[in-house]
Amino acid sequence: MTIDRDPPGAQEQLIRALVLALQQAGQDVQLFETHISWIVIAAGGGDKFSDKFAYKFKKPVHFDFLDFSTLAARLFYCQEELRLNRRLAPALYLDVVPIGGTPSHPVINGDGAAIDYAVKMRAFPQQALWSARIEQGLLSAPEIDALARELAQFHARAARAPAACAWATPAALQKIADDNLALIASLAHGAGRDRGAQQKDIAHIRQWQTRRQARLRSVFAQRKVQGAIRECHGDLHCANILTLDGRVTMFDCIEFNDAFRWIDVMDDLGFICMDLHMHRLPQLAARLLNAYLEISGDYAGLAVLSYYQTERALVRCKVAMLRAAQGKGDDPGDDPGEGQSDAAKEAAALAARYMAFARRSTQATRGALIVMHGLSGCGKSTVSAALLERLGAIRIRSDVERKRMHGMAPDVNAGAPYATGLYDQAATDATYAQLARLVRSVLGAGLPAIVDAAFLRAAQRAQFAALARELEVPFLIVSIEADEAVLRARLAARTLKKDAEAADAVSGGTGGAGGEASDAGPAILTQQLAHAEPLSAAEREYALILDGERGLDGELLAAAFEASFASVCKAVKTE
């Protein structure tokens, strides 16, 4: 599968000679290898990673999706890697350096004609990688939230693909999918699984791709017209994200193939969500997806998300198969044999897991509609946040969408909301209409939807119950009750906190960054109490009633919800 235009093994000899030279100069050296790169990490002394540098070499290989086989190509793509990754990690990516000297005595930045090139980076501890943090059980919810902000902001400022270009057109997406599956099929014989099962999986996915591409053809075209195709990361998985000194950073984006980088923003997001699922962290995947959508407002992108997640699993399957093939030392089409290394066996097993994920993700799913109910301060957002992670649901928040419709960021303090008209009846009616439109996008993608709004009027609840009947999905009200005095105390504390954040922003602090979206205070609660219409006896038949004054244990909440939801689902099936 590889074509070396340089003499076979010449670069590896150069790399190992460089490692030896650095060691002889008193540096501590580490060497890492991927299927397309060598990375040399060198430290001149001391234990500080700020004193360590990494030199990334591109292997002289030629695959169907990249060509590093000439010195000129490696220089060009080193320069591209530097340019592209400085968008995301300027502190890590430093320079492109020539390797001078001779293959047996190479010198970084040496005199004479360059015999190879490397991207010079600032080194970091491998424990900072998310893949390592996950293994150690350290990846946290705040890191997920930080990634959502970084990624949404990166996508918002990334270059937009010209409408006339060939990137991410339906035809281009079909070709990428066909090429990936063709290469997987050619490598699958040596992956260590039953050949019949492999071919059955590949045939099933090929049929699924054909159906989905036909169904989404107009959506793909529309996404491009709307500006969703941007110069993205392109390889956003957990081994390409790190947390260092408290900051989340994405790095190592795709430089070697324009079509892999100029993609739908939901393709980029879908990759990391898929990878979190593969690391058995579905709740963090749901949290990331929801946080990103809340910032970007791109709920329409959910229509293509599952397609891209499946395709990304197949990409990682392909990469793992290539690693397995390289580790065997024989033709990729051959059976594994006794010559297969432990690393190759591990890569083959990983490829099988990705294929299994891809196969599972082609299964049709059915959504559900859950609406929150309760006065401001009762804890609706806290409960809905717990439920969205448990269910893998998409939450739509009235506080966020109301402000988005008025051109305001979610955490902006609206001041006296009633004075600005943000919460008058016309604005409220428009907000609920927008929530219903977004619910259609979520349910159309086969995902559960949670609407986090007060739903204090019977007509509002009836509107969404009718929507659930129209779309033939289960409908559940999660109602949270609390005493007025408790609510007033909570809202007064919230108002003081928001005022402090606003004052901090004026004085040059962080302000409301990541702050509370709700502007509800005691005045709004008074208005709500005057107009609230309690649940009817009929509504309570499909409602889960919670005590908002008690701490809601996650497991108890889940158990109560699942019992109520199972009852609602049974009722839907028998109608």
Image (cartoon, grey):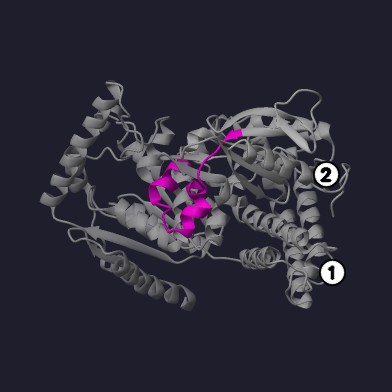
Q: Position of residue 133 (x, y in %)?
A: 46, 53
Q: Residue at x 79, y 73 (%)?
A: 337
Name which residue type carries label 2.
Answer: Ala
* 453 vs 203, nearest the viewer: 203
Return the disc, 2 or 1, that comes first in the chain's sequence.
2
Question: Residues at badges 2 and 1 in contact (C-beta under 8 Å)?
Answer: no
Residue at mark 2: 10
Q: Residues within 10 Å of mark 2 (few under 14, many from 20)?
A: few
Where residue 490 is drawn, which disc sits there?
none
546, above or below 271, in the image:
below
Q: Residue at x 43, y 29 (%)?
A: 407
User: Left or right: where does residue 475 sit relative to residue 262?
Assistant: left
Which residues make up the magenta segment? 121-149
User: Left or right: where does residue 236 sit relative to residue 479?
Assistant: right
62, above or below 473, in the image:
above
Helix, strand or loop at label 2? It is: helix
User: Left or right: where does residue 147 sit relative to residue 259?
Assistant: left
Q: Residues within 10 Å of mark 1 (few under 14, many from 20)?
A: some
Q: Residue at x 29, y 69 (%)?
A: 556
Q: Position of residue 403 (x, y in %)?
A: 38, 35
Q: Quadrant of the N terminus?
A: bottom right
Name which residue type carries label 1.
Answer: Asp
550, above or below 23, in the image:
below
* 519 vs 29, nearest the viewer: 29
Where residue 334 is drawn, which disc sits there?
1
Q: Position of residue 278 (x, y in %)?
A: 56, 61
